[in-house]
Structures are given as C-alpha cells and as structure tokens.
Image (cartoon, coloured by chain):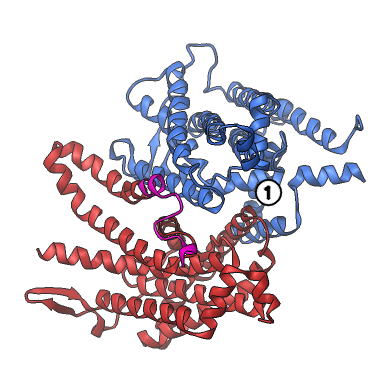
Chain colours: A red, B blue
Amino acid sequence: MLLVVEQFLNGLQFGLLLFLLAAGLTLVFGIMDLVNLAHGSLYMMGAYFAATFVAWTGNFLLGAALALGATLLLGIVLEVSALRHLYGRDHLDHVLATFGLILFFNEAVRLIWGPAGLALPLPAWLTVPVPILPGIHYPAYRLAIIVVALLVALLLYLGVMRTRIGMLIRAGASNREMIGALGINIKLLYTLVFGLGAALAGLAGLMQAPILTVQIGMGENILILAFVIIVIGGIGSIRGAFLAAIFVGMIDTLGRAFLPNLLRQVLSGAAASTAAPALSSMLIYLLMAIVLVVRPEGLFPANRR
Amino acid sequence: MKSFTVSKAVTALMLAGLVLLPLYSQLTGNIFIMTLFTRIIILALAAASLNLIMGFGGMMSFGHAAYLGIGGYAVGMLAQEGVGSGWIQFPVALAASAIYALVIGALSLRTRGVYFIMITLAFAQMAYYVASGLARYGGDDGLTVYKRSDFSGLINLGNRTQFYYLCLACLFGVMVLIWRIVNSRFGLVVQGLRSNEQRMQAIGFPAKRYQLVCFVISGTMCGLAGALLANNTDFVSPAVMYWTRSGDLMVMVILGGMGTLVGPVMGAVVFLLLEEFLSQITEYWALIMGPLLLLIVLFGRGGIMGMLGRFDRG
C-alpha cells in the first residue's frame, strides 16, 4: 500500500514535470510552427544554471529564481539570433538546425562545466519527509514539485485563456497572417512565446536537477518523452499535453515499479528479469502505437477548441 | 544538357577516389585512412538508404539509426550463439530490419509531417532502450563480436582490403538499385506521392501501400549497413541506435543533396571527414559543427549537389 501510494505520487510528479517540457514544445510548435529539438537543451541549461547559481548564492530559492531568469534570457537570445530565421521554412530545416544547436549546447556545457556531472544539493527544509496519509511519508521536495508544477499549469491555463496576451497567442496559433495584419507586433509575440517555453523547460530542468544528476545530454531522453506526449495529446493542444503527460508519467513510473513483479507471476524468474526492463521501457511507446492506430491525430487535437 | 558538368566531374572523381583508396593506403602505408573510409562507406550506404525515403519519398524518418542497430545486433547475437556463417547472419539481419520497418512503417505512415518525424524518432529510441535492456547480450555495455561473419572462404572479412571492397561493392550495388527503383514505375509513383499525395490518391494509387513498400526497402538496405558496421567495429552497442546517429544520417543526406543519387554519399564523405578533421584540431569539435549545421540549413539550399548544379548553370 505504501509503495503503491508512493509510486503513484512519483508518477504524478514525473508526469507534471514532463508537462512543463511538453507545454513549451507544443506552444512553440502550435504558434510559430517551429519544431524545436533544442528544447531539451534549454531543460539542461536550466539545470546547469540552477546548480551554478545555487552554489554561488548559497540559497536554493534565490539560485532557482536566477536560473529561471537566465533560461528565459537564453531562450530570447536564441530566438532572436537563430531560430527567428527558421520560421516559415521546411520542418526538416528546423530539425537539422536545432539538431546543430543541441551539438553546440552539449559541447559548450562540456567546455564550461566539464564532462563530469554536477550535483544540486537540497536545503535541509526540503529533505524532510512529510506525512501525507496516516503512516505514509513522502519527500517534501517531490511534493513541492507537484505543487509548483500544478500551480504553473493553472497559471498557464489562466494566462492563455483569460488574458489579452493569451488571446493574442491563441489568435496567432490559428491565423498568423491575420493577427499580423491587425497590427499586432507578431515578432515580439513570437519572441515572448519562445522565451516562455524556454523558461518552462528551464523550470522543469532545475526542479528535476536535485533528483537526478545534472549532466550533459540529460535533456535528450526526456525531450523524446515530450515528443511522445505531444503525439499522444495532439500537437498544439496544451490541455492534450497536460493529460497525456500525466498519463505517460504514470504509465512509465508504475510500469517500471510493478511490471517486473507482475511478469514474475507469469514467467519464470530468469525470463521475467530479462524481459522486464526491456518491456517496461517499451511501455509508453506501445501506448503511443495504440493511440496512433486508434486516433492518428492524437487524443485531444487542438483544432477542436 | 551539357555532357561535361562540374557535378559529374566531382562525382566521378569521388567514386574513382573511393575505388583507388586501398592502392593509396598500400603505397603510403597509411592504414588509418582505410579504417576511416570503410566506416565512411558503410555510413554512406546508410545515408543513401535514408535518402530513398527522405529525398525521393518525402518521408522524413528520424529513426534510421535503428536499422544500423538491428542489422548489427543480428550479426552480434548470432555470433554470440555460435552461428558464425555470414550466409545466415546477413539474411537474418536484412529480414529483421525489413520486419521492423514493416511494423514501424505501418504505424508511422498513419501520420504525416512533424508527427512522422517525432514518431520514427520515438520508435528508434524504443529500439535503443530494448537493446539496453538485453542483459544477455551486454545490455548498455554492448556486445563484442569476436569473429567476423564467415562467408565460407569466398571472402575474408578479416582482411582489411577485402572488407573495404565488400563494403564498396554493397554501396555501389545499393546505389544502382536505388537508381533502378527511382526510375521505375514504382519509384515514379512514390515521387508523385511526395509531390502531391491527394492527387495521386485521386488517380487511384493506394498511397500508403506504395510508401510502406518504399519504407521497408529503405530499412532493409540500412540493415545491411548495420551488419557491415558490426563487422567493421567488431562491436555493437545500443549507442549505434542513439538518436543523434539518426540525426547524423539526416545531416549527411541534406548536406550532400536530398533526392539526388550521389548526394548522400558525398554528404557522408564530407560530414565524416569534417568531423575527423575538426576533432583533430580541437576536442570540442561539436562547438563548430553545430553552428555549421545551422548555417548550412540557413544558406546552403540543395546541399553540395545543389551548389555544384548552380555552378554548372553558371
């Protein structure tokens, strides 16, 4: 029972983290029609910035805030200097150019921080276990991730659905030329949206950093998960990304935790321990395959809005 | 059409260079260049196979490295289990790649555009994780192939020159095959689908079926490259399927010129030589390579073949 609740929360936490990443990706794609592989690099930069700034300032929250600002800035610089020139080009061009950016970022990190990973230590007040149910404790930091990510998701929803900027963003997504013709500074809007996506990726990276080590290439595997989420949820749909992210986070975490035991009931011990790791890492891709067969456009396509 | 063009001359020069390379290596005693170019030729084969679906078929697969791994693992796993014969290993490698391509293609072709890019990428990553989970075959650490494929004395893969020419023959064979495919009725239909799928469908061609067959042919060719690669490095690991490798293959195709016959080969030669060259200058070669890619995308339309073509037209 304890394990089930714990793994359930872990799945939720991982899913929410994935959502932060996928939301930025899907926003940028939905509005600028840009496929940004370097999104994972921004996630990585967020984590590296956080590790550096926290070590500098000696204060976790201050360091995290600085790292968030730095990733936002980096995103804006990236958009203005390079990615802006890719709008309206072929998707293949986007893939290649941003692939080049990933190489660049990985190498730059190696040059600046060295090939070894960094650790981001948590302050004492975040490491205490918190009782959530009678007799069940859960690490405060993971709980904090859940709360922060949910808050951000709510803010994002309100921001996109209820504010003027959000209205422009939605309008931009459905008709680029029209909104430009109506006198909206579309360039600025794009830069803003890209910066927002970068900050979300950075937030995910810096929150994940204390749990895993901060290392080169950390953004790549999780980026592919974000792709899977977007495919499942439907491109350009934030709501789809949210639901799919939670779904994928849960399935991945619970699959890894419980599949080996389940398999052991069916198969012999040796066969189960061979098949389990391979099968549990396949699980979400199988899920994606099923979604593709049933609904190729994703579960919650954006154009139904 | 002019009989002499710069692009033809450069192509002929490159192909002649590839054929004569072992001679140069013998004369100068430079063994390293043979090892390097064997690798280049194998990856050129993979790039050529990717070009078949990407350049001619308009299917942007970002998971082509999966076949390199599948072909390689077919050789490595059979060798591990005591089946050393290349007559068994290579057909199994090709068949496994074809089956994988059939399944992945059937699923991925339900979508198009960016979705297709993401999905092929995700499935290749799945193959990567599955290989990492194969504890019996080395898991993450990979699998050493202690004995190269044995073709019952016909050709010795352990001999550097013989192996080089085998790879070159495979590359030329695949290029001829691609040429024949592209100019066949089948190939014209596939290219028609790239230009306008709806229209082709309206004429009455079963679009997905044609694309799927093309996808499977391409995957099978790349599986051959994988089997050769495992023999070349005497080693196969999940890393050959890592998604950056798929990206490298895409870059080779674009760099050389998408949708041209020799473009991918030229792209592979230039890309890998550049990588070699830059990594000798600095350890941080990717710092230069990355922005270079960005510039190629922004300014180098049509790749090397496109540039040569513009040269010809004056």
Q: Quadrant of residue B84?
A: top left
Vertical side of B204 occupied by A285: above or below: below
| Left or right: A221 as drawn, with respect to B266 | left
Residue A48: percent from left, percent from top: 45, 73
Q: Residue at x 56, y 32 (%)?
A: B206
Quadrant of the drawing holding the N terminus of chain A: bottom left
Q: Is residue B264 at all visible to an observer of this figure?
A: yes
The residue segment tinted magenta is A289-305
Q: Quadrant of residue A117?
A: bottom left
Q: Which residue is mark 1?
A: B274
- Element at badge 1? helix
| Left or right: B27 as drawn, with respect to B224 | right
Q: Is residue A58 at all visible to an observer of this figure?
A: no
Q: Amino acid at mark 1?
A: Leu
Q: Nearer the viewer, residue B252 or A241?
A: A241
Q: Residue at x 45, y 25 (%)?
A: B95
Q: Nearer the viewer, residue B86 or B141?
A: B86
| Left or right: A177 as drawn, with respect to B222 | right
Residue B16: percent from left, percent from top: 77, 28
Vertical side of A189 occupied by A211: above or below: above
Vertical side of B209 occupied by B150: above or below: above
Q: Nearer the viewer, residue A266 or B276?
A: A266
Residue A15: percent from left, percent from top: 32, 65
Residue B92: percent from left, percent from top: 43, 23
Q: Which chain is disc 1 placed on?
A: B
